[in-house]
Amino acid sequence: MVSTRSVKYKFSEGEKVLCYEPDPAKTKVLYNSKVLDVRVEKDSSGRKVAHFLIHFQGWNSTWDRFVTEDYILKDTEENRKLQRELAEKAQLTAGCGNLYRRERKKRGRVKLSGQASDR
């Protein structure tokens, strides 16, 4: 006999969500995303786990990724606030490296007095 129980997932196909960057080597930020597909696969212990195909809004579809629900948040005002906080923190972190490069470039240029610059 076939089970008629439908499986309820935390997120549904077509739902707009916020998704963490799935690459652990990159800065932890939340992206505007959309659930394209839901697949159920078995994990290493044999339990069924839902994997969601995520499209990152504004990105090429080649960046679409399957992630577990641990990486996804509902699109709520509270989670939007978290998204802004993480983005600010990421900019501060990234800004340090970029500032260093800009300063190095500036120091490398020496302007000689008395010479006109045509640039």
Image: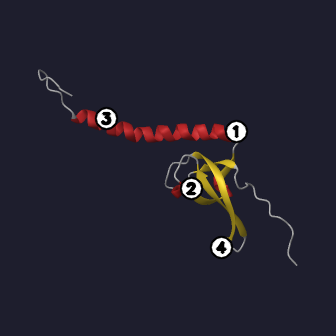
In depth, the one of 63 and 106 nearer the eye is 63
Q: Residue at (54%, 55%) from the top-left corner?
A: 61
Name the amino acid, label 3: Glu
- Determine whether the residue tagged by mark 2 lies in a helix, strand or loop: loop
Give the residue number, with chain letter if any, for mark 1: 78
Give the residue number, with chain letter if any, for mark 2: 22
Give the residue number, with chain letter if any, for mark 4: 44
Name the amino acid, label 1: Glu
- Determine whether the residue tagged by mark 3 lies in a helix, strand or loop: helix
Q: Earlier in the sequence, mark 4 or mark 2?
A: 2
Q: Residue at (68%, 47%) from the top-left corner?
A: 16
Q: Please name which of the two marks, 1 or 3, marks the residue nearer to the observer.
A: 1
91 up-or-down from 49: above or below? above
76 up-or-down from 116: above or below? below
- The 10 Å Cα crowd at callout 4, few under 14, some 14 to 19, many 20 or more, is few
- Determine whether the residue tagged by mark 1 lies in a helix, strand or loop: helix
Colouring rule applied to residues: secondary structure
Cβ atoms at labels 2 and 1 below 8 Å apart: no
Q: Residue at (86%, 67%) from the top-left corner?
A: 5
Q: Residue at (11%, 20%) from the top-left corner?
A: 114
Q: Earlier in the sequence, mark 4 or mark 1?
A: 4
Would you say 116 lies left or right of 52 here?
Answer: left
**Residue pushed farthest top?**
114
Cβ atoms at labels 4 and 1 below 8 Å apart: no
Q: CA distance from mark 3 to mark 4?
A: 49 Å
Quarter that holds the C terminus: top left
Q: CA distance from mark 4 to mark 2?
A: 20 Å
Query: In x, y percent, where is residue 59?
Result: 53, 49
Give the residue number, with chain letter if any, for mark 3: 103
- The 10 Å Cα crowd at callout 2, few under 14, some 14 to 19, many 20 or more, is some
In depth, the one of 11 and 21 nearer the eye is 11
